[in-house]
Amino acid sequence: MSKQVVEEGMHAIALGTAGGPVWWGRDDIDAGISTAIVVDGKVYLVDFGYGAGRQLRRAGHRFGDVEALFITHMHSDHTVDLASLFLFARNEIGDRQVKILGPGNRGKLPPLTPLAKEVPTPVNPESPVPGITETLDRLVRTYSADINDRIFDYGSPSPATKFDIKDIALPAGLPFDPNENVAPEMEPFVIFRDERVSVSAILVDHHPTAPAYAFRFDSRYGSIVVSGDTGYCQNLITISQDCDVLFHEAINLEVVGQQALNTYPDPEVRESVMSHHRRSHTTALDAGRIASMANVGTLVLHHLVPANAPLESWQEAAKEYDGRLIIAHDLDTISLKTSDESIPTS
Ligand SMILES: [Zn+2]
Ligand SMILES: [Zn+2]
């Protein structure tokens, strides 16, 4: 099951490719969204959805190989395996800290749907929209019985000591507003740098989720961009300019619409859900358009919604993009090279 780890160069591993808060549990669709960028054998993770820790192991890596983890936005399908990461990875990490960077506090609740008959009470009203730092602090507290057992019984340190967690600070002066202007046009800004890689971020349009980021990884070998969840967005074109590989999310609105007939029998609610999907996600066709406009070397579609849509439907991207197009499967490895031999797939 596990793979040979490549020690030199830069490549990406699609650890999980399914989008949305769903347990798929099929042989071919078995993990939520998570992507590993590997540079000279060191791992940089983007998002940590359902099964990400297990997928990292299946890809031939241990958590000891991980240098940093970047969270695009606070949706659960991108963060749910952080609980197992905090509780299971401490021995693999050893005497060092793994960096985690992600969105800060949203600042205010999202706008209320016009369908609401009354103003609802939010969950955790004293701090209803926390960012990554506060969320992970709460996670540690949630598991305090387990963690304190280990601290007091055999001196195992709290997982909080193993991670250096930071909210991403937006550049000053941006006209960003979590309700009115989630992705003002801007330039990418550097959020992380070490001897192997420089990571920059840009705001994307995943309304009402905010802030939501795309990330770009530049190394001496080339560049890989991960879109995060977003509607069609100029900032995505900006951050992807001339990159070697763009991982872009994709939604099949037709199949989602058919499935919504069962899930949301009320037509008003259904329309409001579909309007979110139309605005806050990107079709394969538009992902192809973005890849063309940004002059991307390889377009990889992942975060497929729904993950069980017909495979050929994602090929729509090729109508707008004539570069190398890959529809990602769990555990696919995508190298920066352009020859087909460089794509060992599982
Ligand atoms: Zn998502
Ligand atoms: Zn999302």
Image (tube, grey):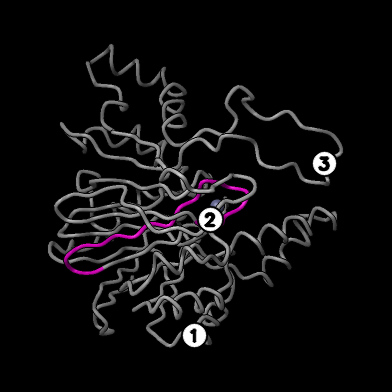
Kindly identify which numbered label has been placed on residue 116.
Answer: 3
Which of the 4 image quarters holds residue 96? top left
The answer to whether residue 55 is left or right of residue 49 is left
Q: Residues within 10 Å of mark 2 (few under 14, many from 20)?
A: some
Question: Does 154 sit above or below residue 204?
Answer: above
Identity of the residue furthest to the front in this view: 173
Question: Does 168 sit above or below residue 341?
Answer: above
For disc 1, the marked residue is 318
Q: Amino acid at mark 1?
A: Ala
**Which percent across, then down, holds residue 243?**
32, 72
**Which percent across, then down, holds residue 77?**
51, 49
What is the spatial separation of the Cα atoms under label 1 and label 2, in whole angstroms?
28 Å
Q: Amino acid at mark 3?
A: Ala
Distance from mark 3 CB to nearest ligand 2 atom below 8 Å: no
Question: Does 160 sit above or below residue 76?
Answer: above
Q: Which residues are magenta?
A: 204-222
Determine if residue 258 is in view.
yes
Question: Does 117 sit above or below residue 154?
Answer: below
What is the spatial separation of the Cα atoms under label 1 and label 3, in whole angstroms?
40 Å
Q: Secondary structure at mark 2?
A: loop
Q: Secondary structure at mark 1?
A: helix
Q: Are marks 1 and 2 in contact (CB under 8 Å)?
A: no
Does the magenta portion include 18? Answer: no
**Which percent across, then down, holds residue 170?**
42, 44
Tell me which residue sits at (27%, 82%) in the image. 338
Closer to the N terminus: mark 2 or mark 3?
Answer: 3
For disc 2, the marked residue is 184
Closer to the N terminus: mark 1 or mark 3?
Answer: 3
**Which percent across, then down, holds residue 158?**
30, 22
Pick the front one: 176 or 279 = 176
